[in-house]
Image: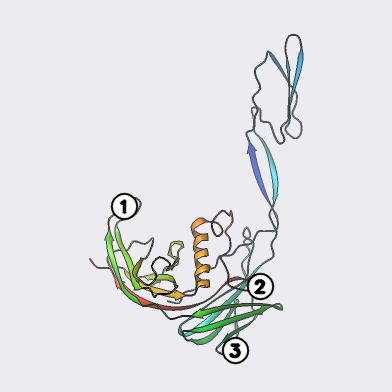
Amino acid sequence: MNQAGTSLYTMPMDEKMRIQLPLNLMKRIPRKPKQYKQPYSNGCHQLLTTSNSKNMKFTYITLSLFLLIGTSCEKVIDIDLKDASPELVIEAVIYKGENDFTVKVSRTAPYFDNTPTEKIDNAKVSLKFEGETLDIPNVGRGEYITFLNAKVNTAFLLEVEVDGKSYSATTDLIEKVAIDSVYYEYQEAFGPREAGYTVFVQFTDPAATNFYRLTHSLNGVYQNGNNDLQVMEDSKINGNKTHFPIRGKIFEVGDKIDVQFIHFDEASYDYFNSLADIINTGGGPNGGSAAPGNPLSNWSNNALGYFSAYSYDTASIIIVE
């Protein structure tokens, strides 16, 4: 169940975005016996002259952009978007036990541009742990792969050098937290929620600060949609027996669900929690951005991405009536 996720990184484009703004901007003038209208100026400014029987009074109304009389006046406004250089993105996950260890190195593309992400194949990548240094070869497509037997309670340092610039990140592989049980409950339809089965993962949280991620496969297919990114921290349940539902999913009779309950460090939690916030708000962390922001990174030298280590327990269940 070692699944490659989808990265989410953006960069403003170096050009002007043209926005056409129709303005229905009008100021009301009290009705007088006569009005003499002068022609519009090039900037859509309007001059109104008003007269009475004895004295001629002139009222000048100048609008900074437009005055609309009967028809729309539109103007194209150029907005300069801030320029930003492409950023390096490094993504890597160590899994407990014997596995291929993959490091992905790339550069960001502008958010409003359709240019594909640049894959970096000329980096120097090395992994350091327990006094050893492991050089990781490039296999193309911006990927660097080697075989690794990762053991718990090990600290790892990953170093990447690109074009003479060095980047580093650390992570700890900690012991898994065992799944006590997996069970399901039938729930009636409520509001927009359809009737069906909810699956729960039950476990005993160790009496320390812990961070978790819950993933699952449905009938053999790994679920990696926007609603499937689920991370948790234990500040409210510390040291207690508890359970987590697989959120946002309704299961049916005959479905087979395989769950993977990941235990990882705080930096890994921060990355995926900020990524979930981006997905849920449609903006940057804590929302408020027209273009998505970038998840929090544990890389030095302002590189984007994450370096994480997973230990996990797995369990499966089939829904029956």
- Total numbered labels placed on residues in the image: 3
Do tag 3 and tag 2 residues touch (Cβ < 8 Å)?
no
Label 1: element kind = loop
Quick one: which residue is furthest to the left in this view? 321
Select label 1 or label 3 by which is in front.
Answer: 3
Say above or below: 43 vs 197. Answer: above
User: Residue sitting at 54 percent across and 80 percent down?
Assistant: 102
Give the alpha-carbon distance from disc 3 to disc 2, as whole Å: 21 Å
Left of 11 or right of it: where is 207? left
Please report contact status of discs 1 and 3: CB closer than 8 Å, yes or no. no
- Badge 3 density bin: few <14, some 14–19, many ≥20, Cα 10 Å: few
Q: Is residue 31 above or below residue 84?
A: above
Residue of label 2: 301
Q: Find residue 133 and name its label.
A: 3
Q: Nearer the viewer, residue 189 or 173?
A: 173
Is residue 18 placed above or below 106 in the rendered structure? Answer: above
Q: Position of residue 189 (x, y in %)?
A: 30, 54
- In the rendered structure, which amino acid carries the disc numbered 1? Phe
